[in-house]
Image: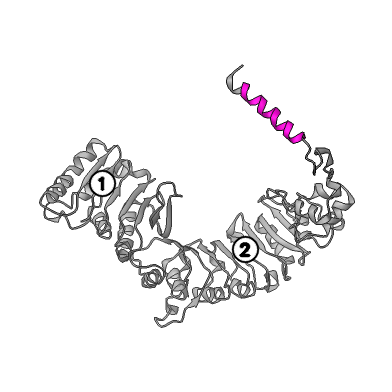
């Protein structure tokens, strides 16, 4: 027998002996009354029921009400405290179900299959109880959505969550101002995908509790002007997250309605996240009309065009962040998009890179991506003036043959925007491209761009990449040797 097991047993016996000892003023273990769950008062049982993990199932309470009449009474008398819901989907016999359970229970309608029965009878039967429906999650077809729309023309006073998305936005019915009876006073979350709703600005002012609004893949038939959108948002003082995503470049606003420079802006006091996908002109008009004092993250994605005229966007950024407050940036190349993201990188052990501002351009060809990125970096260069760390990354498939896609002057334009850059990391597939571009910065031009660069990180450089970057390394090290305060070092793996 081992030493550890030899010493442990007497300790256990000693503890048992102490427990069984009776003190003069106290009885032994048998003196404590036994308590069964049936002897607990109703309020204690209710507290226990509130601690039961539900794991997202609206039917978690069904087992409780079948234990005994008392438990059923406690559950049925506390639907709000227990957050009880009647879950319904396309297969739920709604009319029979609603006759069984109390009318105080709100209804949750959830169906994530795109191929609902064409009649949608059970879903429609549930939606007809407009005064009880609290949450709606529906992924449906245009045919079924037309039938659902016919019964959703009354106010839904207890609706808090609405998520509708359609399998084919091209044939989606247009929602009019009669949708939801023009009022959903308790709505907190609104998610529409592929569904045209040009009358949305008429509904939003009657949804004061909205916290999150996401409008995905808005077709041309669902266009809402920036002016109408900003006016509608002004009523949403609790709004924290707003996303607007247009499906095509036709989302450009009428150029004759561009906002004047003296425009009075509406304040969105609680907005922390703003995401946009569409024409840059639309976003220009929108941000010219709003102030967001609590904003944390702004993510935009613009359709490709020759020139990005974004003065209102730049003013919006200057109202949002202090110039030069960003220390980290990422340039990211994908097959269909190119991004610049700026923000702050957490210290070791943190969650990683926290995006403050992200600008993406939708374009395919690599030369277009570099040209767009050079233009955007030039526009926002005052906000990049204190960036110290730059990561360049790619998932673009054409970089394997980089010699056919080099545009050195535009790469140099990108580098010009990062005047305080100290650390730059380049992925292996981009090593040759960056090395070729850095050859522009040799000789007399050695300090024209990246004057503060101290570390250039090249993981697993190929032989051709090493040869291409050698002139830049030699020129920069020669300059450092002459006494420049910046020290330059190439880190290779």
User: Residue under circle 2?
Assistant: 189
Q: Provide residue 452's location: percent of width, then percent of height.
A: 22, 55
User: Residue under circle 1?
Assistant: 456
Q: Provide residue 376's location: percent of width, then percent of height.
A: 33, 62
- Which residues are the magenta region? 6-20
- Mark 1 packing: few (<14 Cα in 10 Å), some, or many (20+)? some
Question: Is residue 202 placed above or below 459 in the rendered structure?
Answer: below
Query: Which mark is in front, 2 or 1?
Result: 1
Q: Residue at x 17, y 42 (%)?
A: 470
**Residue farthest to the top?**
1
**Residue farthest to the bottom?**
262
**Residue farthest to the front?**
24
Compared across the picture, whether 73 is left or right of 261 comes to: right
Compared across the picture, whether 457 is left or right of 51 comes to: left
Quadrant housing the C terminus:
top left
Q: Residue at x 31, y 41 (%)?
A: 428
Q: Residue at x 80, y 41 (%)?
A: 24
Question: Is residue 323 placed above or below 343 in the rendered structure?
Answer: below
Which residue is more in the foreground, 355 or 373? Answer: 355
Quick one: label 2 or label 1, which is nearer the N terminus? 2
Does the stretch in magenta take in 10?
yes
Compared across the picture, whether 28 is left or right of 365 comes to: right
- Magenta stretch, main secondary structure, is helix
Q: Provide residue 66's location: percent of width, then percent of height.
A: 85, 47
**Residue farthest to the left?**
482
In three-dimensional space, the C-alpha distance between marks 2 and 1, rounded to whole angstroms, equals 46 Å
- Model colouring: one colour
Question: Is residue 165 placed above or below 477 in the rendered structure?
Answer: below
Q: Provide residue 74's location: percent of width, then percent of height.
A: 83, 56
Q: Secondary structure at mark 1?
A: strand
- Specify the quadrant of the image occupied by residue 373: bottom left
Quadrant housing the N terminus:
top right
């Amino acid at each position: 027998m081992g030493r550890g097991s030899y010493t442990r047993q007497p300790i256990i016996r000693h503890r048992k002996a102490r427990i069984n000892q009776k003190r003069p003023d106290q009885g032994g273990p048998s003196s404590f009354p036994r308590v069964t769950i049936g002897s607990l008062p109703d309020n204690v049982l209710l507290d226990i029921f509130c601690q039961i993990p539900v794991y997202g199932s609206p039917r978690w309470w069904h087992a409780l009400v079948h234990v005994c009449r008392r438990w059923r009474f406690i559950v049925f008398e506390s639907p709000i405290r227990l957050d009880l819901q009647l879950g319904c989907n396309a297969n739920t016999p709604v009319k029979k179900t609603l006759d069984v359970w109390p009318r105080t229970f709100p209804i949750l309608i959830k169906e994530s299959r795109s191929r609902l029965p064409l009649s949608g009878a059970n879903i429609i039967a549930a939606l007809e109880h407009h005064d009880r429906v609290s949450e709606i999650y529906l992924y449906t077809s245009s045919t079924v959505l037309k039938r659902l729309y016919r019964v959703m023309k009354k106010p839904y006073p207890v609706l808090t969550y609405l998520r509708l998305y359609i399998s084919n936005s091209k044939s989606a019915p247009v929602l009019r101002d009669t949708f939801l009876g023009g009022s959903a006073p308790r709505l907190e979350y609104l998610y529409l995908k592929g569904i045209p709703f040009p009358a949305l600005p008429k509904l939003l002012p009657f949804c004061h509790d909205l916290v999150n609004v996401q409008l995905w893949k808005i077709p041309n038939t669902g266009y809402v002007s920036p002016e109408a959108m900003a006016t509608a948002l002004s009523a949403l003082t609790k709004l924290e997250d707003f996303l607007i995503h247009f499906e095509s470049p036709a989302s450009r606003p009428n150029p004759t309605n561009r906002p004047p420079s003296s425009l009075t802006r509406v304040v969105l006091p609680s907005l922390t996240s703003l995401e946009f996908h569409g024409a840059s002109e639309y976003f220009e008009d929108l941000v010219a009309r709003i102030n967001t004092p609590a904003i944390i993250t702004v993510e935009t994605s613009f359709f490709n065009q020759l020139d990005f005229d974004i003065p209102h966007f730049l003013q919006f950024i200057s109202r949002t962040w202090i110039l030069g407050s960003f220390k980290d940036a990422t340039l990211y190349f994908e097959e269909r998009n190119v991004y610049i993201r700026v923000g702050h990188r957490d210290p070791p052990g943190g969650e990683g890179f926290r995006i403050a501002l992200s600008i993406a351009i939708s374009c395919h060809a690599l030369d277009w991506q570099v040209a767009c990125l050079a233009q955007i970096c030039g526009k926002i260069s005052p906000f990049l003036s204190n960036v110290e760390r730059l990561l360049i990354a790619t998932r673009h498939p054409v970089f394997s043959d980089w010699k056919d896609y080099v545009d050195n002057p535009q790469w140099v334009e990108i580098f010009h925007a990062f005047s305080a850059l100290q650390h730059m990391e380049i992925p292996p597939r981009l090593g040759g491209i960056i090395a070729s571009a850095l050859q522009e910065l040799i000789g007399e031009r050695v300090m024209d761009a990246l004057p503060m660069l101290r570390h250039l990180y090249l993981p697993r450089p190929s032989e051709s990449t090493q040869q291409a970057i050698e002139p830049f390394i030699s020129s920069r090290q020669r300059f450092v040797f002459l006494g420049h305060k910046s020290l330059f070092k190439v880190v290779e793996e």
